[in-house]
Image (cartoon, rainbow, N blue to C red):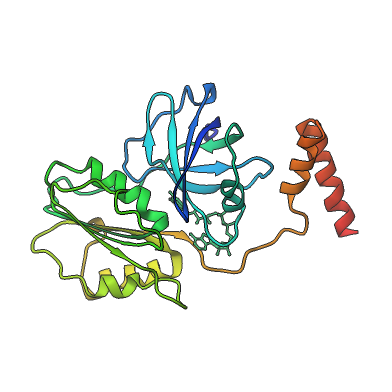
Amino acid sequence: MTRRAEQYDAQVLRREALGEHLVRLHLGGPGLADFRSTGVPDEWVGLVVPGQFQHRYYTVRAVTDETVVVDVVVHAEGLVTEWAERDCTGETVTLTEPKGSFTMPPDAAWLLLVADLTGLPAIARIAESRPAGLPCRVWVESADDLGDYLPDGDGLEVTWLRPPVGVTSALADVVGAIDWPAGDGYFWMAGESAQMRAIRKHLRHDRGLAASAYDVMGYWRDQARQRRSVDPGPIWRAGKAAGKTDEQIWAEYDAAREEETR
Ligand SMILES: Cc1cc2nc3c(=O)[nH]c(=O)nc-3n(C[C@H](O)[C@H](O)[C@H](O)COP(=O)(O)OP(=O)(O)OC[C@H]3O[C@@H](n4cnc5c(N)ncnc54)[C@H](O)[C@@H]3O)c2cc1C
């Protein structure tokens, strides 16, 4: 029998702008009482924001008994982006059960981490939780100056890169130019999905890495936004402002969609 995936309601306790394109949300409240971290440093949750029913994935940047912290990249337009851009303090979101992927072999002699801004929260948590002194080289593509974001010293070497103009990312070139350390280690990377497919190919074919020596995750897709004919967000916000119940609001949303398809 399959188990129903857990979901957790949480309130935005605090919203902090870390940079022009990065917003930190501290989530808490009684709904998180049963939330248990996997302990895997790149763990993520699905986040459903008010007035929406689709989730987007976000890394658990930090977790305590009372709070879950996520860092949200605010890009040109998007369901979570548009919500996180405004003051969402006090609002209720839903989180899905956390999952993780990072599986560094215990005998890895070094760690290489590469990402755009969406992978920075995971890089920070991986770097913080790695064995003390394990040599770790990091490349991050970011339009924001976030020099203080990553822990300093203890074998950590960070290269900040500006995103290129006119193309999604130059991280494939960065990986192609890496001077790989001797011995066996672990390579972790996250960014735009199409680029990640090219990188996996490079690691397998050009570098001859075994699948257990790397983890390359597509975090987002560079594609035209799929617009729904009727966006539930404005309907939900107007309904809330008018003091309607969720049930009434969703009935109005269904009616608007039916009207649209007539
Ligand atoms: C395991 C995992 C962990 C993740 N962790 C984080 C995290 O900690 N922080 C974080 O910010 N993101 C993270 N992401 C990426 C995030 O889920 C996507 O970027 C997501 O699409 C953002 O949702 P949105 O509602 O803002 O935009 P969407 O509604 O999904 O997309 C709208 C439009 O924006 C474009 N778009 C989406 N993301 C980006 C982007 N980053 N830059 C430029 N254009 C974009 C799409 O192509 C689309 O055209 C993670 C993804 C995965 C799979």
Picture mark count: 0
Task: Compare residues 213 and 157 and report the one nearer the observer.
Answer: 157
The residue nearer to you, when weighing 21 against 9, is 21
Residue 169 location (% of width, % of height): 40, 71
Is 43 on the left-hand or right-hand side of 203? right
Q: Is residue 1 visible?
A: no
List the single residue furthest toward the left: 182
**In this picture, residue 161 sits left or right of residue 234:** left
Query: Above or below — where is 165 with respect to 261?
Result: below
Task: Residue 201 in the image: state x and y as whole percent.
Answer: 32, 72
38 left or right, relative to 17: left
- The residue depicted at 24 percent of the width and 47 percent of the height is 127
- Point 34% across, 70% down: residue: 171
- Up-down: is 166 above or below 144? below
Q: Is residue 64 visible?
A: yes
Q: Position of residue 219 (x, y in %)?
A: 44, 57
Residue 136 placement, left or right of 162: left
**Residue plotted at (57% across, 52% down):** 81
Name the residue: 39% across, 24% down: 65
State the image quarter where residue 161 is shown.
Answer: bottom left
Percent x, y for residue 33? 47, 22
View extreme (bottom): residue: 166
Quarter of the image for residue 206 reads: bottom left
